[in-house]
Amino acid sequence: MTETAAQPLTLYATAQEIPPDHRGGHTLGRDELVVEDLDYDHALEAARRGVPEGWRIIALRVERESVATG
């Protein structure tokens, strides 16, 4: 079995204010956090720590650097 080198990844987490109720009609703040790491779980935990009180993560996107082989 061969070991593969860890590939750097960039995790984009979209965070949004939690609405005060579910009736709708609220203007909610939205922001994107960007975390770079070698490990997905570490990147996700760092993103969660960056979400302010009263906000939540509503979307995640991950990009990995492509590594040339050959």
Image (tube, grey):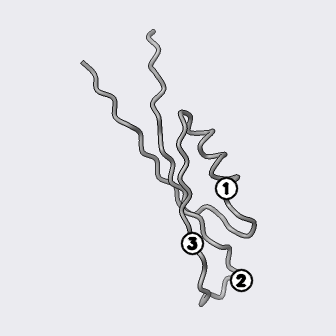
Amino acid type at image mark 2: Asp
Amino acid type at image mark 3: Arg
Residue under numbered circle 1: 50
Q: Quadrant of the N terminus?
A: top left
Residue under numbered circle 3: 30
Q: CA distance from mark 2 to mark 3?
A: 17 Å
The reply to whether discs 2 and 3 touch (Cβ–Cβ < 8 Å) is no
User: In this rendering, is residue 15 above or below 22?
Assistant: above
State which mark lies toward you, 2 or 1: 1
Tag shown at residue 21: 2
State the SS at label 1: loop
Q: Quadrant of the C terminus?
A: top left
Q: Residue at x 41, y 39 (%)?
A: 64
Tag shown at residue 3: none
Relative placement, left or right, of 58 versus 10 is right
What is the residue that sits farthest to the top in this orientation? 1
Q: Residue at x 46, y 21 (%)?
A: 5
Amino acid type at image mark 1: Gly
Which is more N-terminal, label 1 or label 2?
A: 2
Relative placement, left or right, of 20 versus 66 is right
The reply to whether discs 3 and 1 touch (Cβ–Cβ < 8 Å) is no
Q: Where is residue 17, by image quadrant? A: bottom right
Q: Where is residue 33, by image quadrant? A: bottom right
